[in-house]
């Protein structure tokens, strides 16, 4: 059972009367890296489609989400443990369009792989919703305002990030695809996206998302495609909000990133509610990814074929809702959809595993131990209102069945 929880945790600073965007910008210009001539290998954990790295504050190590699509932010409970200088209060907006006033602070030093970053600007927020949704133990989000002072190479296969101040220290492959990006104030990277020779949008390179190449649904008419789609309805958790998202996924024969990096047979997803265009880890994990803020270039070296196995599925995922296990997403034309399952149906039992008495620890164990890939049939008991129902669901290859496409 694939657990699909697209975590859109992009943070954007907005103009407001509390403190100006210029004050935040000026504070970020004071951020700096303390060493020179370095190259470090940093192991990371890849959990629920997100990169988790270790960074030290006040000489104590903590887990952070590695998020190129965000500014740095820490949990409010964790903020009580660290020393910082307050800058002020400012409005923030997540990718669902929800606003919240957050405290903006400056941390004296953040160390990653023994490399010290000083005067780091961060915001403070309650991250419990994200932590509870993912069951990932982390204290904050390591954002682009830290990363933009060096070169980062992400090896998803080996689960290693190489941190260096010179891209010349990295091995270069002749098969690499290199393209430019734009980063205002050297923050979050935005990439020019072209499909069928037509410019579509500036997409955000967002390692804080476990999605692929995701676009707002409004771009469907811009592209003018008549493809079939894999359609999924999902409860989406953002940093500040939660909502129902309808996504449509298809395969594009060719898309172009930047001004010349052509990608063949790529999955492309259109989202009904989200207004953000982004490239997330589901796409990036097939590559060795190098991000160079100095020259504003990204390099991709293919490490595996596009992974279509995520669409070999029973057609549903689980989420925890008020201490009960429920259906959190449902894919149209999947076995689960044809069996009559609905989002928010309470899951009472899957095969021999009883979920009637369920708690957060059980939920985290379920996420950690997904149903074996070799399992092709499940017997599920759900409750809807006062009625219980039992159905069988089967693994379906939606790429071939819905899209009628074979690599």
Image: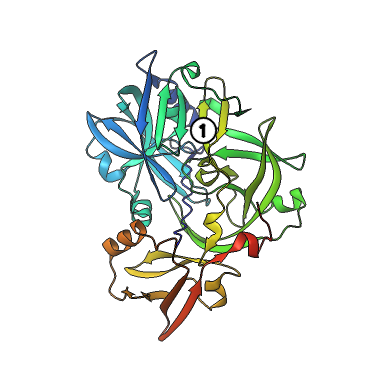
**Image spot of residue 221 (x, y percent):** 75, 53
**Image spot of residue 8 (x, y percent):** 49, 49
- The residue singled out by tag 1 in the image is 289
Is residue 342 something one can see in this rendering?
no
- Residue at the front extreme, as displayed: 374
Identify whether 331 is placed above or below 281. below
> Which of the 4 image quadrants contains residue 118?
top left
Label 1 secondary element: strand
Identify the residue shown where x is 61% and y is 70%.
333
- Residue at the bottom extreme, as displayed: 387
> Which of the 4 image quadrants contains residue 155?
top left
The foreground one among 7 and 83 is 7
The foreground one among 42 and 385 is 42
Identify the residue shown where x is 36% and y is 27%.
41
For the N terminus, give its image quadrant: bottom left
Q: Is residue 84 left or right of residue 317?
A: left
Identify the residue shown where x is 25% and y is 34%.
61
Is residue 94 something one can see in this rendering?
yes
Q: Is residue 255 left or right of residue 96?
A: right
The foreground one among 51 and 320 is 51
**Image spot of residue 361 (x, y percent):** 27, 61
Identify the residue shown where x is 34% and y is 59%.
369
Identify whether 234 is placed above or below 163. below
Q: Residues within 10 Å of mark 1 (few under 14, many from 20)?
A: many
- Residue at the top extreme, as displayed: 37
**Image spot of residue 49 (x, y percent):** 44, 48
Identify whether 41 is placed above or below 90. above
């Amino acid at each position: 059972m694939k657990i699909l929880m697209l975590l859109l945790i992009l943070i954007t600073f907005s103009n407001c009367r509390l403190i100006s965007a210029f004050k935040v910008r000026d504070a970020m210009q004071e951020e700096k890296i303390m060493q020179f001539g370095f190259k470090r290998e940093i192991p990371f954990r890849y959990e629920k489609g997100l990169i988790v790295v270790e960074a030290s504050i006040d000489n104590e190590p903590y887990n952070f989400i590695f998020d190129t699509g965000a500014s740095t932010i820490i949990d409010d409970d964790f903020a009580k443990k660290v020393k910082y200088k307050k800058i002020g209060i400012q409005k923030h907006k997540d990718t669902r369009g929800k606003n919240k006033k957050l405290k903006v602070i400056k941390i004296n030093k953040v160390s990653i792989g023994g490399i010290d970053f000083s005067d780091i600007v961060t915001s403070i927020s309650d991250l419990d919703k994200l932590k509870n949704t993912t069951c990932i133990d982390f204290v904050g989000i390591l954002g682009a305002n830290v990363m933009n002072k060096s070169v980062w190479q992400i090896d998803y296969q080996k689960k290693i990030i190489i941190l260096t101040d010179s891209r010349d220290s990295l091995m270069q492959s002749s098969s690499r695809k290199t393209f430019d990006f734009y980063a205002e104030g050297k923050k979050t990277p935005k990439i020019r996206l072209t499909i069928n020779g037509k410019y579509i949008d500036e997409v955000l390179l967002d390692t804080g998302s476990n999605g692929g190449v995701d676009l707002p649904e409004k771009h469907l008419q811009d592209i003018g495609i008549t493809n079939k789609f894999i359609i999924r309805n999902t409860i989406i958790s953002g940093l500040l909000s939660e909502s129902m998202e309808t996504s449509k996924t298809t395969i594009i024969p060719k898309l172009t990133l930047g001004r010349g990096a052509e990608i063949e047979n790529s999955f492309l997803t259109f989202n009904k509610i989200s207004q953000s265009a982004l490239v997330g880890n589901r796409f990036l994990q097939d590559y060795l990814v190098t991000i160079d803020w100095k020259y504003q270039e990204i390099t991709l070296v293919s490490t595996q074929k596009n992974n279509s196995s995520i669409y070999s599925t029973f057609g549903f995922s689980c989420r925890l809702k008020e201490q009960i296990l429920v259906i959190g997403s449902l894919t149209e034309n999947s076995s689960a959809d044809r069996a009559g399952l609905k989002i928010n149906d309470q899951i009472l039992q899957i095969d021999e595993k009883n979920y009637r008495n369920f708690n957060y620890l059980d939920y985290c164990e379920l996420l950690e131990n997904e149903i074996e890939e070799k399992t092709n049939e499940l017997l599920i008991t759900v409750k809807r209102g006062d009625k219980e129902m039992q159905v069988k669901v089967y693994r379906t290859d939606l790429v071939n069945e819905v899209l009628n496409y074979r690599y």
